[in-house]
Image (cartoon, rainbow, N blue to C red):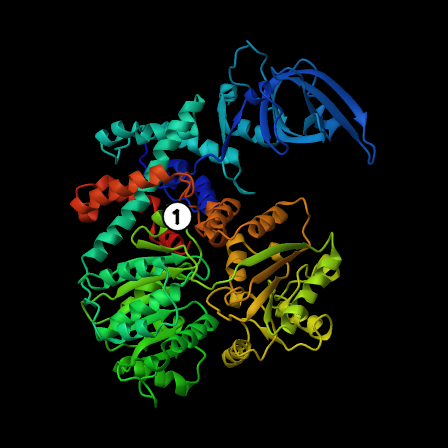
Amino acid sequence: MATLRDRLDHVLGVKAADSLADAFDMQTVEDLLRHYPLRYATQGQPLSEEAPEEGAHLTLVGVVTKTELRPMKNRRGRLLKVELDAGSAKPVEITFFNGDKVSYLVKQGVRAMMSGTVHYWRPDRWNLSHPSYLILPEAGESVENLTAVRGSGDLRGLAQSAKGAEGVDVSFFEREYIPVYPATAKVQSWDVLACVRQVLDQLDPIDDPLPQELRADRELLAVSDALRLIHLPERKSDIEQARERLRFDEALALQLVLAERRHDAAGRVAKPCPPRTGGIATEFGKRLPFELTAGQKQVISEISEDLSSPHPMHRLLQGEVGSGKTIVALHAMLQVVDAGQQCALLAPTEVLAAQHYRSLRGMLGELGTAGELGAADNATKVVLMTGSMSTGAKKAALLDAVTGEAGIVIGTHALIQDNVEFLDLGMVIVDEQHRFGVEQRDALRAKAKDGISPHLLVMTATPIPRTIAMTTLGDLETSTLTELPRGRSPITTRVVPARMHPKWVDRAWERIREEVGQGRQAYVVCSRIGEEEDKPKAKGRKAKPEEEKEGPTTHAARDVYETLSAGALAGLRVGLLHGRLPSDEKDAVMRAFNEAEIDVLVCTTVVEVGVDVPNATVMVIVDADRFGVSQLHQLRGRVGRGKHPGLCLLITETSPMGTAMARLEAVAGTLDGFELSVLDLRQRREGDVLGSAQSGTARSLRLLSLLDDLEVITAAQHLAREIVESDPGLNRHPGLATMMRAAVDGERLEYLAKS
């Protein structure tokens, strides 16, 4: 017998266990049973309703009514054309390309299972091309074990997995639903199925972590039933009920982690920072040259109340591109400075950190120049700290932080280094929070005085749908800015299909010249720098002939800079900015662009967030199909930030009928970042959102949809908070504690935090 915690090598043997460990990082019985089927092979029910979609995968059972060998037109060999009576109105047409090898088995009158992909060769005619197949006993015959497997491809593999000492258990292929698993080249779906069946045959009864009354209230299956039925369902309702239970487990496991984190934070101590009449925050408010929006005032009030508490604030501030998050964050920082404490602002890039430094200094004026001539009486000091600063500048910044001279310290990951100390750190602000993990946030917060937790404000200009925020940032309260400040100009976005209309590309460069001629500026954004070609090939690796002939398929920033400077934009002041430039050079280029000494900035995505040049009105994004939806939305937010309307041109050579073009048209069709973020997540799929596509780590959330399962996530959140409130540490709920640790381990939580 076996339990969920048993090692797979003890249950399956070393050879099978090692294969599963190498392919899927499975170690225990539970790891294997939570490797759920991707889909189920069914026996042709959809055919009685309507024609299947192009590319759909069908598994059919029927009788071969006709076969015909035909010579192939363009190469040697013969095709086998087959008609299969699968119970639908018309026979299903099937084509085998190795006809001579198949025809001795696939003959008229035999009963067979066929599994393949639908291809349409005329609008009203489709077939299965070269499917896998398995010859079955005649209908009504005994399905006793066969001594040989007759077939090919995946179905043959499945049959081999069902082969025991007495032969092949053909009865398994009489099932209505046959599971198909995520697989690799070395561990196929049928290998996983064989292991799952072996484990289920030995599995002991499972103690359910969910109380009986909760299961009854939500009409959920017992976990033991759900784990069996997800793999070996008898009917469609079995699959739906199993998924419903296991989906709730995933949501609850994650929400328990977030509820514990939230409970832990609520028990920490922070220094209260109540607003002070007559302080620097009040003075700054009086000097503002514009009226705050109603949304900004509301969020400032929410943050102010949090900062006045003796417990640390944990708040997410999200808002559209250009919605005025920086001014809200600055109000919060000044309230903390008024209380005699310091603030640290963590930015993901040096370009953004330097931009924040210039922006905050500019907004504060003499209120941000403490220690300098002309500073206001109640001024504070703003300093910048990045990894590539000169030794002298870095020492000065470190000294200002540790002595408390600097009320606001802005920096990159350099702020997290051990040698950075603060006199009295009262608040941490993390900009573009998705670029940082929980550990990095906590490392900076740990620089406060012993026993004190600084207030935390995380900001993002990437709109987060409600379910995503609840699932990945459930330990944070959320404030959202939806209005744009007065005076912000509209942005028009147009797609430029270079393949169909090459002259439109020329017109894009003309538009830049026209805007520059009226005293304005422009960005040209590229997807890569272009220095990759200069790198030596990896040792021992020879370039493939096609690599040498084809070269890169995208336009590099360096190449575009040289081409435009000498061609379409000759005579204009064109600058180049990318992440591999030395820090001082990057800062000099950005400063020159800010001061209108550069007309056109050719750059990479280093300008994606935080860069604020009100005089820039045009952005041309080259190879726009190489960027994600949210990234395109962020990039175009760099224009239209002043009194003149913004124009964003998306140049692409992708097919006009492809999904990439549809994505670009969607971006051009709306400025609603929340709408686009949902589209982006649906297209990238949620496994990528959680980081698994980049990391290679198995998905933490296998069944739960972060976009569609709002009711499940909400119910799980309420329950998790109730449980943790009454039982911190889950000492009275050991089953839930085990489920939480099994479903969402620390490494996967890090991916969640970065989603």
Q: Is residue 539 left or right of residue 245?
A: right
Mark yes or no: residue 209 visible.
yes
Location of residue 737 by image quarter: top left
Could you say which is closer to the camera, residue 571 or residue 534? 571
**What residue is drawn where x is 62% and y is 26%?**
151
Q: Is residue 473 left or right of residue 534?
A: left
Within-10-Å neighbours for mark 1: few <14, some 14–19, many 20+: many
Label tally? 1
Amino acid tagged 1: Ile
Q: Position of residue 495 (x, y in %)?
A: 64, 54
- Residue at the far bottom: name it: 373
* Residue bearing the label numbered 1: 468
Q: Position of residue 333 (x, y in %)?
A: 30, 70
Quick check: 738 above or below 366? Answer: above
Mark yes or no: residue 602 visible.
no
Quick check: 492 above or below 660? Answer: below
Quick check: 593 above or below 173? Answer: below
Location of residue 424 by image quarter: bottom left
**What residue is drawn where x is 65% and y is 68%?**
512
Could you say which is closer to the camera, residue 672 or residue 548? 672
Q: Is residue 189 left or right of residue 556?
A: left
Q: Is residue 596 left or right of residue 318?
A: right
Quick check: 203 above or below 47? Answer: below
Location of residue 408 by image quarter: bottom left
**What residue is drawn where x is 41% and y is 51%?**
464
Q: Position of residue 175 (x, y in %)?
A: 49, 20
| Image quadrant in which the N terminus is located | top left
Could you say which is closer to the camera, residue 15 or residue 446? 446
What element does badge 1 sit on?
helix
Q: Position of residue 566 (x, y in %)?
A: 72, 75
